[in-house]
Structure formats: structure tokens, C-alpha cells
Image (cartoon, grey):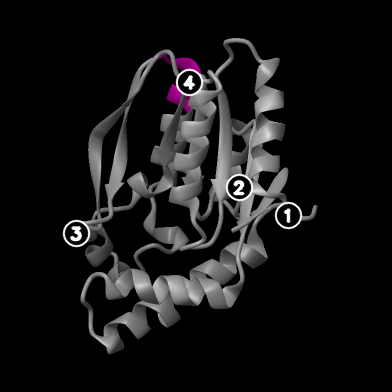
Amino acid sequence: MSSLSYNELLAILAHEFDGLGNKRSFIALAGPPASGKSTISEKLKADFNTKGFISDILQMDGFHFDDSILTSKGLLPRKGSPETFDVQGLKNYLSRLQNEGEVVVPIFDRSLEVSRSSAHVITQETQIIIVEGNYLLLNSEPWSELKKYFDFTVMLDCEEKVLEKRLIERWESFKLSKDDINKKVYDNDLPNGIKVIQNSNKADFNLFN
């Protein structure tokens, strides 16, 4: 499928939701690191709410393993790669959100680079949950087990050079040295992005960002 514009995607999804009544629906918004998932998910949330669909966000990044666990497993340099997330925990919360009303969920605090548990309330009235994260459509287990929870899937398309530039700028904001930035970008973040591009299941919709 060719990529849609944001307004095209919004119109299609809003039309789909018009006929769903009070059923809670889930959108998976996937894409490489720095492809704009957080920005697009917040924009979708605001626009859906404006259209009368009570919406909220569940962050995949809220399920990062703590740095102490990553250190014990020798995975701290790989933080952000698929094996550094609690996928079973994410599955449990998706199941709860399907079957329960109000659910308190974790978030990822990017200013601290840590997950914060029980940090956000998704209310009983919430009709649309936008689940955003890099690996939601990955075609290998355990990530591939998530697809049964999603009503619609969206992949953010982004050129590799643009991703590279955004990733460098992200780590520059943490005042890291150039060597440390290069290690994070070229040894971890960019390879993770390429994995998402090359090894994700086909999405219902693609959005160029």
C-alpha cells in the first residue's frame, strides 16, 4: 500500500470508528525509532477527541526493562532493542484493556530514560486506544503474538537518512559526547530501525512522516 497523508489516515479511521458504537478499539502505531510515533499518536488522540471519540495512548516504551535488569543481563548497551522489553507485560495490559474499564498503565519518562509504573489512568470511557511503539508489528515471537489485540495497524514510513539525523539530534539533547552518540545511533538505534523496516508484518495503513 502507498503511504497516506495524515489527513487521509484520520478520515479513514474516523469513518471506521463511526460504526463501532461503544466498542473499545485498538490502533497499533509502529515505526522505527525517531519516525515520529509519539508526535503522531498525540495528534491522533487530540483529533479523535475533537471528533467525539474518547481516545488515549498506551506506550510500548512503558514496558522497558529497568536498567538494573538490563545490566544483569548484559543488555544495557542494547537498551531499546526488541529483547529489552517486557513483552508479556505489554500483552497482559492489552488483555486488561480489552476486558476491563479503568486501567492504570506505565509510561516511559524520556527525560530520565526510565519506565514509571502506575503512572497514567486510561479511563473506563476511553473508546480508542492508540498503542505506539517500534516493534508492535514485528514478525518474530513474542512480538508477533500482539497482532490479535489490534483492530487497525499503521506503519510510519521514514527515510533512513532522516531517521539518522533525528536520532543524532535526540542524543545531542542529552549533552552526550560525539563518540557516545555515534555508539548509540550506529550500534543500536539505527540497526533497530532497519530491523523494524525489514522485519515487520504488513500494516493496514502506511503514513509517510
Q: Nearer the viewer, residue 110 or 47?
A: 47
Q: Tell me which label, 4 or 1, sits earlier in the chain.
A: 1
**Along the horizontal axis of the image, is 142 left or right of 15?**
left
| Mark 3 to mark 2 CA distance (whole Å) | 27 Å
**Amino acid on which disc 3 is placed:** Ser
Query: Nearer the N terminus, badge 4 or badge 2?
Result: 4
Labels 1 and 2: the sequence-earlier one: 1
Q: Are marks 3 and 2 in contact (CB under 8 Å)?
A: no
Badge 3 element: helix
Disc on res. 194:
none
The image shows residue 205 at horizontal and vertical percentages of 71, 45
**Magenta residues, start to end:** 95-101
Decide if residue 159 is on the left or right side of residue 117. Answer: right
Identified at 43% across, 13% down, the residue is 125
Q: Are the two marked residues, 4 and 2, in contact with CB atoms closer than 8 angstroms?
A: no
Report the disc number at residue 54.
4
Residues packed near mark 4 inside 10 Å, few (<14), some (14 to 19) or many (20 plus): some
Disc nearer the start of the sequence (3/2): 3
How many marks do you count on the picture?
4
Tag shown at residue 3: 1
Q: How far apart are marks 3 and 1 (CA)?
A: 40 Å
Tag 2 residue: 144
Is disc 3 in contact with disc 1, using a CB cutoff of under 8 Å? no
Q: Which mark is residue 68?
A: 3
